[in-house]
Image: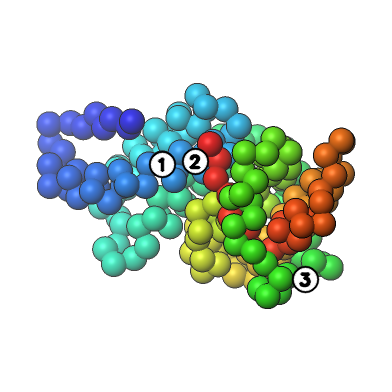
């Protein structure tokens, strides 16, 4: 659990307001961080730093706006600041928007990744995605964020969210189909065809 070390001049009312809004998001933020960094200790450090940064910046948060998106954006930016410039250049270079049309909503089954989230092949397939694709599929299919909310968190256009999501889902399906000794059945392949949901345990 996150603990806040505040000075004697800290406004108790402001702190209480922050905790009321922020603490219910702890599990979601940790879950997202755990997928991003693959390591429990690093995920805990990332979430801790996110909360401390958010607390220091809480006065700048505009009431009535999306607090969850604000918190996730701080976590994402904190994560990026810990990544090497080389890794960021590599992932950005793979972010071509061409030839990856958005999958139609009529072809999807929302529960598919949730049903298979305990499958090592599914976890491996998601963890091997470049960050720019991993974060989109996690926010949409794990955290159930809307395209608009994801666009706000990542500071990208909604069209880019949809394109990256289509690419991420395609990569996951292809990875599962090519897993050694564990080919997807027709039913499983269909279940990974669209708007999946998943949880990192």
Quadrant of res 155: bottom right
Number of marks present in the image shown: 3
Q: Position of residue 90 (x, y in %)?
A: 76, 44
Q: Position of residue 47 (x, y in %)?
A: 43, 36
Q: Earlier in the sequence, mark 1 or mark 3?
A: 1
Question: Which residue does the numbered mark 1 point to in the structure image?
Answer: 27
Question: Which residue does the numbered mark 2 point to in the structure image?
Answer: 31
3 displayed left or right of 186: left
Outermost top residue: 41
Q: Residue at x 32, y 47 (%)?
A: 24
Q: Nearer the viewer, residue 199 or 157?
A: 199
Cβ atoms at labels 2 and 1 below 8 Å apart:
yes
Q: Residues within 10 Å of mark 2 (few under 14, many from 20)?
A: many
Question: Which residue does the numbered mark 3 point to in the structure image?
Answer: 101
Q: Residue at x 54, y 51 (%)?
A: 142
Q: Earlier in the sequence, mark 3 or mark 2?
A: 2
Question: Of tags 1 and 3, which is closer to the observer?
Answer: 1
194 displayed left or right of 11: right
Quadrant of res 131: top right
70 displayed left or right of 104: left
Q: Residue at x 55, y 45 (%)?
A: 199
| Label 2, label 1: how far apart the Cα atoms are | 6 Å
Q: Position of residue 87 (x, y in %)?
A: 71, 38
Asked whether residue 138 is in view, the answer is: no
SS at mark 2 in the image: helix
């Amino acid at each position: 659990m996150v603990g806040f070390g505040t000075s004697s001049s800290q406004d108790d009312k402001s702190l209480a307001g922050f905790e009321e809004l922020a603490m219910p998001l702890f599990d979601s933020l940790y879950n997202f961080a755990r997928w991003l960094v693959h390591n429990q200790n690093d995920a805990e450090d990332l979430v801790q730093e996110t909360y401390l940064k958010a607390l220091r910046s809480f006065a700048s948060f505009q009431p009535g706006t999306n607090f969850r998106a604000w918190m996730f954006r701080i976590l994402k930016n904190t994560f990026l600041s810990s990544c090497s410039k080389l890794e960021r250049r590599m992932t950005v270079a793979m972010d071509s928007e061409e030839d990856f049309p958005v999958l139609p909503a009529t072809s999807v089954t929302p529960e598919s990744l949730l049903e298979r989230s305990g499958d090592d092949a599914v976890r491996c397939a998601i963890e091997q995605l470049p960050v720019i694709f991993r974060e989109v599929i996690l926010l949409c299919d794990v955290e159930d964020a809307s395209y608009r909310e994801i666009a706000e968190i990542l500071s990208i256009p909604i069209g880019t969210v949809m394109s990256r999501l289509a690419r991420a889902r395609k990569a996951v399906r292809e990875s599962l189909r090519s897993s050694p000794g564990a080919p997807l059945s027709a039913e499983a392949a269909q279940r990974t065809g669209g708007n999946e949901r998943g949880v990192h345990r």
